[in-house]
């Protein structure tokens, strides 16, 4: 390394007589060259740089690097490679590419709260327990309304939108701790003294992913009427920024609050707060084809599967095993639906009358079927925040301004002319909508997880122990964690497990953290780089035949001669003639 503290000291030591060279040009000395720049020597082996989020380019943070095509990959291999070898090596390359991208994504986001809530064993457990408590409370309120008869007679049709909204209001009011007397007044169309089921809110359009929930709450909790905070998952297409919703009581001075926090910045990013409007339409209709018997029977099967799946995920109801039907849930909304889960058709009658399978009659709406179906759909919407007819899950709804917001129901009237093809097309679309809901709990296989680099706890602990067992000499070992010395490596090992058990537990949790991320088939990932738009060919300019025009002198164009004298020698010019006679020019210039 250099012993000089400044570049000037180094230069003067190397060239004590250095002066700028000059030569004479005319009567003035001219500097012919600039002072030579000499940099002090540098270390040829700089320390290895560690990966840091802020050192990544914008593209690295927002899009996946481009994987080589098979053709491009072949150009990197030997010419004598066989087809089988090329396919095998390309598969290995793609697998290693995916492993590397997963690992880099994990390192980039592992310190962010949203990522830890999804995958870290501690925060994931806390989040799961909190959501379970929300769900159990929703089950209690649902069963309370169901036992009062408020659900059984309600049909989920657009013509009954007002009744449906009233039920949603009653449900939310009870969730917020309202009394049964106030719920009764809502049912009678009278607003209670405290509108617990209504809020007013502020929307935050951009929240940096490293900003924690408690940091935002610290800003807003001091304002009267604060209720809760909801945060979305980061948006990969928007540099992983999050959105937020701050809910306040209905009577809060929301405009004043929004104005006061308009300039608040965290992580050097403004929240950009705006007032969040009330829902324009809470109950929304879907196609009337959903009223057909064939469609409703299909929906009963699909909805009951989703209910069982989500109830089991959150352990909301006890289940028993039946020898005939298998698992049987104690959830009352699943009672007496067996007959609707079995497909029926008049096969013998159709055979005798000569009907084929494609000649099935279209069945109209059956009230009994709709009673069973609506109970299932209401349970999904009120308890699990699943909007069945749109195939949507409203995540974190208990933290949102509307704890039971948009709800899609059937159009009251069926289409006048509905063919079997229309029904088949509608059912096909419905299957696609509900497919993600039925795959909510799936995880990738251990074989696939192993290929993606899943870690082993015992192996990670062994590496940790070896890294903290330092050999000093003959039968002398040091534990860097405590600074104590031991006569053998086994004693260090026992010491680590006895005195530093919390460190060992941290290693286990780090492995579980990474593995939870790898095993999630819906794990977040960087989007692929958008393909460049094809360059359009430049359009050829339209060519016109040349037009001869007589050239006039500047004097003529300034009005000293009648320009009309030249018109017989050229085509007429559509442009207007500019008259410069009002300018005070000297004739001698021409």
Image (cartoon, rainbow, N blue to C red):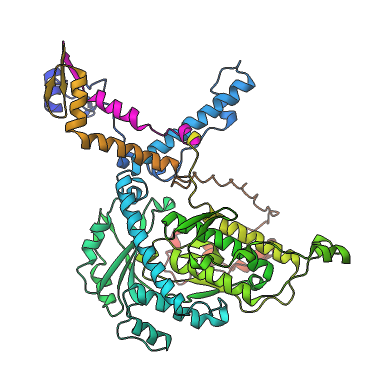
Q: Residue at image x 24%, y 62%?
A: 217
Q: Quadrant of residue 473?
A: top left
**Residue 503, image x and y in percent?**
22, 35
Q: Residue at image x 61%, y 76%?
A: 411
**Residue 549, image x and y in percent?**
65, 58
Q: Residue at image x 34%, y 51%?
A: 114
**Residue 232, image x and y in percent?**
38, 58
Quadrant of the frame with the N terminus: top left
The magenta stretch is 448-474
Q: Is residue 474 above or below residue 114?
A: above
Q: Quadrant of residue 220?
A: bottom left
Q: Can residue 60 be seen by looking at this rendering?
A: no
Q: Quadrant of residue 363?
A: bottom right
Q: Is residue 451 above or below residue 151?
A: above
Q: Can residue 402 be seen by looking at this rendering?
A: yes
Q: Is residue 586 magenta?
A: no
Q: Is residue 460 magenta?
A: yes
**Residue 335, image x and y in percent?**
54, 67
Q: Is residue 105 above or below residue 556?
A: above
266 or 522: nearer the viewer: 522
54 or 8: nearer the viewer: 54
Task: Say whether residue 549 is left or right of residue 321.
Answer: right
Task: Say whether residue 563 is left or right of residue 175.
Answer: right
457 or 226: nearer the viewer: 457
Q: Residue at image x 30%, y 42%?
A: 54
User: Residue most toward the front?
Assistant: 323
């Amino acid at each position: 390394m250099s012993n000089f503290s400044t570049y000037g000291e180094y230069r003067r030591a190397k060239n004590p007589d250095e002066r700028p060279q000059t030569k004479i040009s005319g009567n003035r000395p001219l500097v012919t060259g600039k002072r030579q720049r000499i940099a002090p020597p540098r270390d040829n082996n700089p320390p290895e740089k560690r990966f840091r989020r802020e050192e990544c380019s914008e593209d690295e943070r927002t899009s996946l690097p481009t994987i080589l095509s098979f053709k491009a990959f072949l150009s990197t291999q030997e010419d004598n490679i066989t087809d089988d070898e090329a396919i095998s090596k390309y598969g290995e390359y793609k697998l290693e590419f995916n492993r590397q991208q997963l690992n880099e994504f994990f390192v980039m986001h592992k310190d962010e709260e949203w990522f830890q809530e999804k995958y870290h064993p501690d925060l994931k457990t806390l989040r799961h327990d909190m959501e379970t408590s929300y769900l159990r409370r929703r089950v209690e309120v649902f069963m309370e309304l169901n036992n009062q008869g408020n659900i059984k007679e309600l049909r989920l049709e657009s013509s009954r939108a007002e009744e449906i909204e009233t039920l949603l209001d009653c449900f939310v009011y009870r969730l917020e701790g309202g009394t049964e007397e106030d719920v009764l007044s809502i049912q009678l169309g009278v607003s209670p003294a405290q509108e617990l089921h209504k809020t007013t809110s502020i929307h935050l359009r951009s929240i940096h992913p490293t900003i924690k929930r408690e940091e935002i709450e610290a800003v807003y909790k001091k304002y009267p009427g604060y209720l809760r905070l909801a945060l979305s998952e980061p948006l990969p297409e928007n540099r992983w920024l999050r959105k937020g919703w701050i809910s306040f009581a209905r009577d809060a001075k929301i405009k004043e609050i929004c104005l006061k926090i308009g300039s608040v910045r965290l992580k050097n990013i403004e929240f950009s707060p705006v007032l969040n409007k009330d829902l324009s339409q809470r109950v929304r209709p879907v196609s009337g084809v959903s009223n057909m018997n064939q469609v409703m029977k299909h929906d009963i099967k699909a909805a009951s599967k989703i209910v069982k799946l989500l109830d089991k995920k959150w352990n909301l109801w006890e289940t028993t095993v039946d020898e005939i039907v298998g698992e049987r849930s104690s959830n009352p909304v699943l009672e007496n639906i067996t007959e609707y889960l079995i497909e029926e058709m008049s096969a013998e009658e159709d055979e005798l009358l000569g009907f084929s399978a494609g000649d099935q009659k279209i069945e109209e709406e059956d009230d009994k079927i709709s009673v069973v179906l609506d109970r299932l759909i209401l349970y999904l919407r009120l308890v699990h925040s699943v909007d069945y007819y749109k195939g949507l899950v409203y995540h974190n709804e208990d933290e949102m301004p509307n704890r039971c917001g948009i709800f899609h129901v059937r159009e009251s009237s069926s289409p006048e002319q509905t063919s079997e093809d229309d029904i088949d097309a509608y059912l096909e679309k419905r299957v696609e909508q509900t497919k993600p809901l039925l795959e909510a709990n799936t995880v990738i296989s251990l074989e696939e997880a192993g290929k993606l680099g899943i870690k082993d706890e015992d192996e990670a602990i062994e590496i940790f122990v070896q890294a903290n067992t330092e050999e000093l000499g003959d039968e002398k070992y040091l534990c860097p964690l405590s600074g104590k010395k031991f006569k053998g490596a086994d004693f260090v090992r026992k010491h680590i497990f006895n005195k530093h058990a919390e460190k060992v537990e941290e290693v286990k949790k780090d492995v579980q953290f990474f593995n939870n991320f790898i095993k999630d088939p819906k794990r977040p990932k960087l989007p692929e780089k958008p393909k460049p738009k094809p360059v359009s060919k430049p359009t050829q300019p339209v060519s016109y035949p040349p037009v001869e025009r007589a050239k006039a002198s500047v004097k003529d164009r300034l009005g000293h001669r009648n320009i009309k004298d030249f018109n017989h020698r050229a085509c007429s010019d559509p442009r207007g003639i500019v008259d410069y006679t009002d300018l005070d020019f000297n004739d001698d210039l021409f």
